[in-house]
Image (cartoon, grey):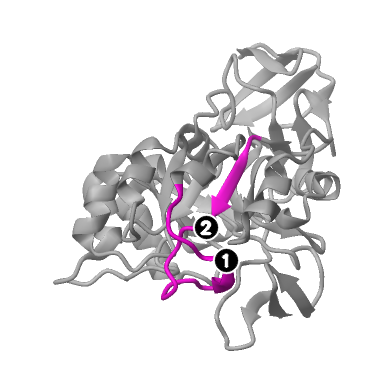
Amino acid sequence: MIISNANVKGKLVSIVIENGSITEITDKVLAGDIDANGRRVVPGMVEIHAHGCMGLDTMDADFAPMCEYLGSKGTTSWLPTTMTMDYDSLKRVDEAKTDFPGTNILGFHFEGPYISHKQKGAQNEAYIKDPDLEGFKQFKNVKMITMAPELPGSMEFIEKCGCVVAIGHTSCDYATAIEAIEQGANCLTHTYNAMPGLHHRNPGPIAAAFEKQIYAQLICDGFHVSKPMVLATYKLFGSDRMVIISDAIRPAGLGDGVYDSGGLEVHMKDGAARLADGTIAGSTATLWQCVCKAVEFGIDFDEAVKMATETPSKLIGADKKGRVEIGCDADLLIISDNMEIDNVIIGGEVFR
């Protein structure tokens, strides 16, 4: 496949694709299978934190419809994100079939069960437990885990668990966060949400993450984090360390109503999902919509795209994802002038 007249970061090029990979990017105008006509071509979105969509949840372990929906919306790689649940339910997800048309599943993100009762957010506290290294070893496909480092046994778990550790759903202080980072934790989960905020005398985990320059996930749906704080986080961490996520849940792609999420009742109204007590329960946005919101807030287009493609790919070690470069997987989006997704290419094949 050849994509001609592709605008890649302001430069018109032809992109040659063979066997699912980008093999050449040239200034020459080649006869293309797809003529981008000067439209932007960007990497497919890489979602490291989303629970579900279209009435389905990761805990259902029914990934074919979700892969199709997410792929059609421009998310070409995904870490299905679990809820805090019992080990049997988590094992059923971890062992589920994941090879379906649409978005590529690169592994799982376990959000819990090793989290704080005080900062449980929309997680079911009945299943919260302390870190359990031996119990965790039964899960073979976990790429990332979110945990609270103040819990007993956390530091040994962080050091030995063998996956990316994100600090989240936590009440930890600055010193505990620093220790966790020094043991290997390398990310904040949905920064600001379900953790202590920044304070000038009690700096907490966000300041520790900034000082140590680890990654920071941020839900950029317009509900979870205000515009000034999105921009402040971008200034603090930059596009090399800030990761845009959607944290989408079961109602994403559907209308207003009442839904189940991890055994909790979620009310969706006007695009916002909340528990009955008003707690924000996740988002209903796609990752591309979150990128568009970042641009609307004033972040440069290419920088916003990077934070949802290249940066999360580097965090999870997916070296061939998230970039329009020779040798990378041909997961690409063709974007219209009004920021709509015109085409989705996954593995060198037109998906939409």
Write the residue at 39% across / 61% down: 231
Labels 1 and 2: the sequence-earlier one: 2
Quadrant (top left/top right/bottom left/bottom right) for the C terminus? top right
Q: Secondary structure at mark 1?
A: helix
Quadrant (top left/top right/bottom left/bottom right) for the N terminus? top right
Q: Could you tell me how many numbered marks the image carries?
A: 2
Q: Is residue 39 left or right of residue 310?
A: right
Which residue matches tag 2?
Answer: 112
| Name of the residue lying farthest toward the front | 134
Magenta highlight on residue 133:
no
Magenta highlight on residue 109:
yes
Q: Does the image show residue 288?
A: no
> Which residue type carries mark 2?
Gly
Front residue of this view, candidates 57 and 222: 57
Residue 110 screen position, x and y as percent? 56, 50
Write the residue at 77% across / 31% down: 345
Are dots 1 and 2 in contact, CB under 8 Å? Answer: yes
Front residue of this view, candidates 203 and 143: 143
Q: Residues within 10 Å of mark 1 (few under 14, many from 20)?
A: some
Which residue matches tag 1?
Answer: 127
Q: Does the image show residue 219?
A: yes
What type of secondary structure mainly makes up the magenta span?
loop
Residue 25 screen position, x and y as percent? 62, 15
> In which image quadrant can residue 184 be found?
top left
Residue 38 screen position, x and y as percent? 69, 32
Residue 159 screen position, x and y as percent? 34, 38
Q: CA distance from mark 1 to mark 2?
A: 9 Å
**What residue range appears in magenta?**
106-132
> Which residue type carries mark 1?
Tyr
In the image, residue 332 sits, relative to residue 127, either above or below, namely above
Q: Residues within 10 Å of mark 2 (few under 14, many from 20)?
A: many
